[in-house]
Image (cartoon, rainbow, N blue to C red):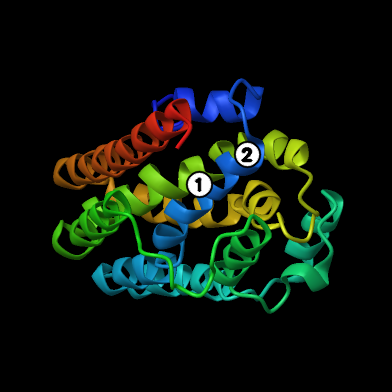
Amino acid sequence: ALAHRAVHHPYLRALAAGTLDGDRRLLADFALHYQGYSACFPRYLTTVIARLSAPAHRRALLENLVEESGVYGAEELAALAAVGVEADWVDGVPHPELFARFCAAVGVPADGSAPTPLEVICWRESLLGLLAHGSEAEAVGALGLGTETIVSTMYQAFLPLLARAGLSPRDAVFFPLHAAVDDHHQATLLAVARDLAGTAHGREGLVKGMRKALALRVAFWDHLWARAVQGA
């Protein structure tokens, strides 16, 4: 997954390198589109939890859901402090609210009043359909291998852009947070995936789910890349 175009898309490379004009414009356009996907992440996670047949797997992912609501242990807070994230910026704040804070900082309404672009609706509905109606292994492959595994690497591309745009660390904290501590989420889902990979059917489902989720993200990046080049 880490070698996929979803992680090394020209759009992400351009954001990191600063080869496109209008840093604030790029961030605002990303925020406008991505908030419709990001706000539903707890729903994606609960959908996968409901698909899991093993109680131990459900318990493990419930811990991830707790972290999504802004509850961290001492180890996670220490890791965040090491990269300059203060505890009161994130502790007790659900991740969708952190993204809403970023949206507000770049001038995008964070109250849901802005229409959700059709491309985002298609991405969100396609992913939810995959999680809800694919096999258990497909659901884990999509959210684990095809989503959480790439998040910390993918968000690294935004850090130089955020610095160039002059956002305060508090307003931009959604990105370093995910770049720094999503390893735990990845490890949890990878452990579940390893258990499901014990059969040929399970392995096939994991790969199918991963590839479908990565393809959906590439389509989203393609859309934003076209808008960025056109100066939308």
Q: Which disc number belongs to residue 71?
A: none
In the foreground, 80 or 124? 124
Query: Is residue 62 positioned above or below 165 on the image?
Result: below
Q: Quadrant of residue 59?
A: bottom left
Q: Residue at point 33% right, 55% down?
A: 117
Q: Residue at point 30% right, 42% down?
A: 210
- Residue 197 visible to the viewer: yes
Q: Quadrant of residue 98?
A: bottom right
**Dot placed on the residue nearer the N-terminal end, 1 or 2:** 1
Query: Is residue 67 positioned above or below 215 on the image?
Result: below
* Apparent side of residue 143 relative to residue 26 in the rendered image (left or right): left
Q: Nearer the viewer, mark 1 or mark 2?
A: 1
Q: Which disc number belongs to residue 158?
A: 2
| Residue carrying label 1 | 30
Q: Residue at point 28% right, 51% down?
A: 123
How far is the residue under mark 1 from the one under mark 2?
Answer: 10 Å
Quarter placement of the C terminus: top left
* Residue at disc 1, secondary structure: helix
* Apparent side of residue 124 relative to residue 61 in the rendered image (left or right): left
| Residue type for callout 1 | Phe
* Residue at disc 2, secondary structure: helix
Label 1: few (<14), some or many (≥20) within 10 Å?
Answer: some
In the foreground, 36 or 84? 36
| Residue type for callout 2 | Phe
Measured as percent of width and height from the top left, residue 112 is found at 44, 72
Q: Are marks 1 and 2 in contact (CB under 8 Å)?
A: yes
Measured as percent of width and height from the top left, residue 89 is found at 77, 68
